[in-house]
Amino acid sequence: MVAITIRGVPDDTRAELAARAARKGQSMQEFLREHLVELAARPDMEELLERIRRRREAFGGGLTAEQIVEMKGVDQK
Protein backbone atom coordinates (compact mmCIF):
# COMPACT_ATOMS: atom_id res chain seq x y z
CA MET A 1 0.00 0.00 0.00
CA VAL A 2 1.08 3.56 -0.60
CA ALA A 3 0.78 6.67 1.52
CA ILE A 4 -1.03 9.76 0.27
CA THR A 5 -0.44 13.23 1.67
CA ILE A 6 -2.90 16.03 1.03
CA ARG A 7 -1.69 19.53 1.76
CA GLY A 8 -3.74 22.67 2.10
CA VAL A 9 -6.88 21.14 3.60
CA PRO A 10 -8.86 23.91 5.33
CA ASP A 11 -9.03 23.62 9.11
CA ASP A 12 -12.83 23.47 9.17
CA THR A 13 -12.82 20.67 6.59
CA ARG A 14 -10.30 18.68 8.60
CA ALA A 15 -12.34 19.21 11.77
CA GLU A 16 -15.54 18.03 10.10
CA LEU A 17 -13.85 14.91 8.72
CA ALA A 18 -12.37 14.15 12.13
CA ALA A 19 -15.80 14.54 13.74
CA ARG A 20 -17.41 12.21 11.20
CA ALA A 21 -14.69 9.63 11.74
CA ALA A 22 -15.12 9.87 15.52
CA ARG A 23 -18.90 9.39 15.23
CA LYS A 24 -18.22 6.16 13.33
CA GLY A 25 -15.62 5.07 15.87
CA GLN A 26 -12.87 5.26 13.27
CA SER A 27 -9.55 7.00 13.02
CA MET A 28 -9.36 9.69 10.37
CA GLN A 29 -7.10 7.39 8.35
CA GLU A 30 -9.66 4.56 8.43
CA PHE A 31 -12.49 6.93 7.58
CA LEU A 32 -10.69 8.54 4.64
CA ARG A 33 -9.38 5.24 3.29
CA GLU A 34 -12.92 3.82 3.32
CA HIS A 35 -14.23 6.82 1.40
CA LEU A 36 -11.37 6.83 -1.09
CA VAL A 37 -11.92 3.14 -1.85
CA GLU A 38 -15.66 3.80 -2.38
CA LEU A 39 -14.90 6.82 -4.58
CA ALA A 40 -12.49 4.83 -6.75
CA ALA A 41 -15.03 2.02 -7.16
CA ARG A 42 -17.70 4.34 -8.59
CA PRO A 43 -17.55 5.36 -12.24
CA ASP A 44 -16.82 9.01 -12.91
CA MET A 45 -19.35 11.06 -14.88
CA GLU A 46 -17.63 10.42 -18.23
CA GLU A 47 -17.67 6.64 -17.70
CA LEU A 48 -21.26 6.71 -16.48
CA LEU A 49 -22.40 8.63 -19.57
CA GLU A 50 -20.51 6.20 -21.80
CA ARG A 51 -22.27 3.25 -20.15
CA ILE A 52 -25.61 4.94 -20.73
CA ARG A 53 -24.75 5.55 -24.40
CA ARG A 54 -23.78 1.88 -24.89
CA ARG A 55 -27.01 0.67 -23.27
CA ARG A 56 -29.10 3.00 -25.42
CA GLU A 57 -27.34 1.73 -28.56
CA ALA A 58 -27.87 -1.88 -27.50
CA PHE A 59 -31.62 -1.27 -27.20
CA GLY A 60 -31.91 0.89 -30.32
CA GLY A 61 -32.61 4.10 -28.48
CA GLY A 62 -34.84 4.41 -25.47
CA LEU A 63 -37.03 1.93 -23.69
CA THR A 64 -40.74 2.28 -23.17
CA ALA A 65 -42.18 2.23 -19.66
CA GLU A 66 -43.63 -1.21 -20.43
CA GLN A 67 -40.20 -2.56 -21.42
CA ILE A 68 -38.64 -1.22 -18.23
CA VAL A 69 -41.36 -2.80 -16.09
CA GLU A 70 -40.97 -6.08 -17.96
CA MET A 71 -37.19 -6.07 -17.50
CA LYS A 72 -37.59 -5.37 -13.79
CA GLY A 73 -40.07 -8.24 -13.46
CA VAL A 74 -42.68 -6.03 -11.79
CA ASP A 75 -46.27 -7.27 -11.81
CA GLN A 76 -48.48 -4.42 -13.08
CA LYS A 77 -51.67 -5.74 -11.45
Image: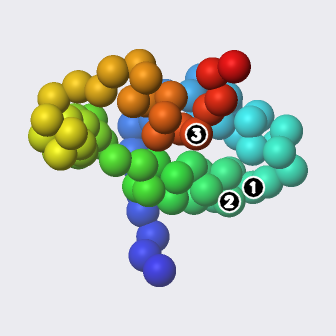
Q: Give the labeled residue for mark 2.
A: 30
Residue, x 63% and y 22% (percent of image)? 76
Q: Which amino acid, by three-letter code, is at mark 1?
A: Ser
Viewer-closest of 29 and 43: 43
| Neighbours of disc 1 within 10 Å: few (<14), some (14-19), many (20+) | some
Left or right of residue 7, residue 26 in this image: right
Residue beneath label 3, please? Answer: 73
Q: Dot 2: within a 10 Å radius of its alpha carbon, few (fewer than 14), some, or many (20 or more) residues?
A: few
Q: Earlier in the sequence, mark 1 or mark 3?
A: 1
Q: Residue at x 76, y 34 (%)?
A: 19
Q: Amino acid at mark 3?
A: Gly
Considering only vertical position in the picture, is 22 above or below 29? above
Query: At which x and y percent is residue 35?
Result: 56, 49
Q: CA distance from mark 2 to mark 1?
A: 5 Å
Q: Nearer the viewer, mark 2 or mark 3?
A: 3
Q: Position of residue 2 (x, y in %)?
A: 43, 76
Check if mark 2's residue and mark 1's residue have beta carbons within 8 Å.
yes
Say if residue 46 shows up in the picture.
no
Q: Is residue 53 toward the left or the right of residue 31 in the image?
A: left
Q: Nearer the viewer, mark 1 or mark 3?
A: 3
Q: Is residue 40 visible?
A: yes
x and y percentages locating residue 50 in the rendered image: 18, 42
Q: Nearer the viewer, residue 69 or 23?
A: 69
Image point 79% across, 54% down: which residue? 26
Q: Nearer the viewer, residue 62 or 3?
A: 62
**Residue indicated by mark 1:** 27
**What element does badge 1 sit on?**
loop
Question: Residue at image x 56%, y 28%?
Answer: 13
Determine whether label 1 and label 3 are within 8 Å by CB. no
